[in-house]
Image (cartoon, rainbow, N blue to C red):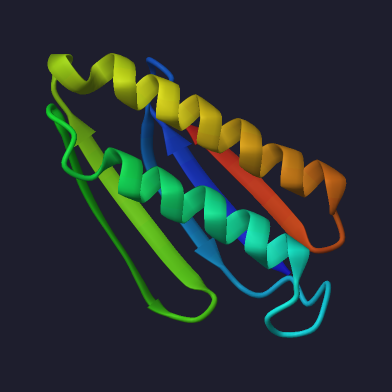
Amino acid sequence: MIAIDVAVDEAGLLRSCAVTGHAKAGPKGGDIVCAAVSVLVRTALKTLSGREGIMVRGDAPERGVFWMEMDYTQEGRDFLFAVGAFLTEGLESVSIEYPDYCTIHIRRN
């Protein structure tokens, strides 16, 4: 099972995302659930990295583990909101489509 924990601040801006586990919905290298989650979180990290006004840290230290945290200035606020909304919607869609393999918890701080 993949467990996703997302934190957003009071303005609805993404502050962190952590993913742990394996879906085991298919063979290694052919698991559609793992592939979908991986593409979403890695693309979000890459899209936010180097963007003016957004400071992001993240890592995937081993298979089945991913995390990222971010801070922002006013300059990066709108871009972070858009990327965060896209990421959250995408991850929620995966968890709705494959509830036996993926769960998501969104914390609003």
The image quarter in which residue 32 lies: bottom right
From what the image shows, is residue 84 above or below residue 11?
below
Which residue shows up at 33% across the image and 26% down it?
80
Query: x, y percentage for residue 1?
Result: 73, 69
Q: Residue at x 43, y 21 (%)?
A: 82
Residue 8 in the image: above or below residue 31: above
Indicate left or right for 70 with 36 as reference. Answer: left
State the residue at coordinates (67%, 66%): 34
Which residue, as the protein is rendered here, is positioned at the far front?
Answer: 30
Q: Residue at x 38, y 15 (%)?
A: 11
Vertical side of 21 occupied by 102: above or below: above
Asked if residue 1 can be seen in this view, the reply is yes
Q: Is residue 57 above or below residue 48?
A: below
Q: Is residue 109 visible?
A: no
What is the x, y in percent for residue 58?
Answer: 29, 59
**In the shown orientation, is residue 52 left or right of residue 9?**
left
Q: Position of residue 54 (x, y in %)?
A: 18, 33
Residue sitting nearer the eye, 16 or 109: 16
Q: Nearer the viewer, residue 38 or 17?
A: 38
Q: Choose top left, top right, bottom left or bottom right for residue 50.
A: top left
| Residue in the foreground of this view, choosing between 22 and 107 | 22
Quarter of the image with the C terminus is: top left
Label total for image: 0
Q: Is residue 74 left or right of residue 106?
A: left
Relative side of 68 to 51, left or right: right
